[in-house]
Amino acid sequence: MTAPNPTNSNSPPLTDSWDGRGVCVLVVDDNEQNLELLEAYLEDLHCDLTLARDGMEALDAVTAKRPDIILLDVMMPRMSGFQACAKLKGDAATRDIPIVMVTALNEVSDVERAIECGADDFLSKPVNKLELLTRVKSLVRISKMQQELQRALTQLRSFRDGG
């Protein structure tokens, strides 16, 4: 047997094949420095960013342009991240959007509450850049695959039903 040739076009790519073009990330935090930091970290993904400063702005932003993923701070004025997450996950139109809770809270009860609200993942502040980028890419890929699966299932049902 011969070893795989890294220059062979049939071999899988050796580098990350992430392409963030067309991916929309909604970042929600009431602290301007946190927004700027997350924005700077996410630049490496080459995705579209939308920023919101509280849960109410987040809901408006989701209505204006559906994001592929939401990074949601927990402690905010007007509407907390817990409340915004519960509202988004309770709506059939938005429940499939992955939500990552970004929090300085580290109590088990806070994690339990976020899970109850429907959060898909968690990041602790201060946010580690590599961890942030890895989780965003992973959750977006999973979400896109789920969407493709649903389209394929719909198409199969259509064929089965003679449509």
Image (tube, helix red, strand yellow):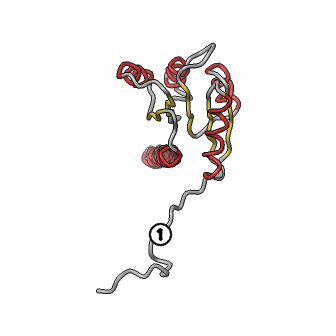
Q: Residues within 10 Å of mark 1 (few under 14, many from 20)?
A: few
> Number of numbered discs present?
1
| In the image, residue 74 above or below residue 24 | above
Q: Residue furthest left?
A: 1
Residue underneath mark 1: 14
Q: Position of residue 111 (x, y in %)?
A: 39, 24
Name the one closer to the observer, 13 or 108: 108
Residue 87 visible within the image: yes
Label 1 sits on a secondary structure element that is loop
Name the one closer to the observer, 155 or 61: 61
Q: Position of residue 49 (x, y in %)?
A: 67, 41
Residue 163 visible within the image: no
Q: Amino acid at mark 1?
A: Leu
Q: Position of residue 162 (x, y in %)?
A: 47, 47
Q: Residue at x 65, y 19 (%)?
A: 56
Q: Residue furthest top?
A: 78
Q: Residue at x 38, y 80 (%)?
A: 4
Name the one closer to the observer, 88 or 127: 127
Q: Residue at x 44, y 48 (%)?
A: 156
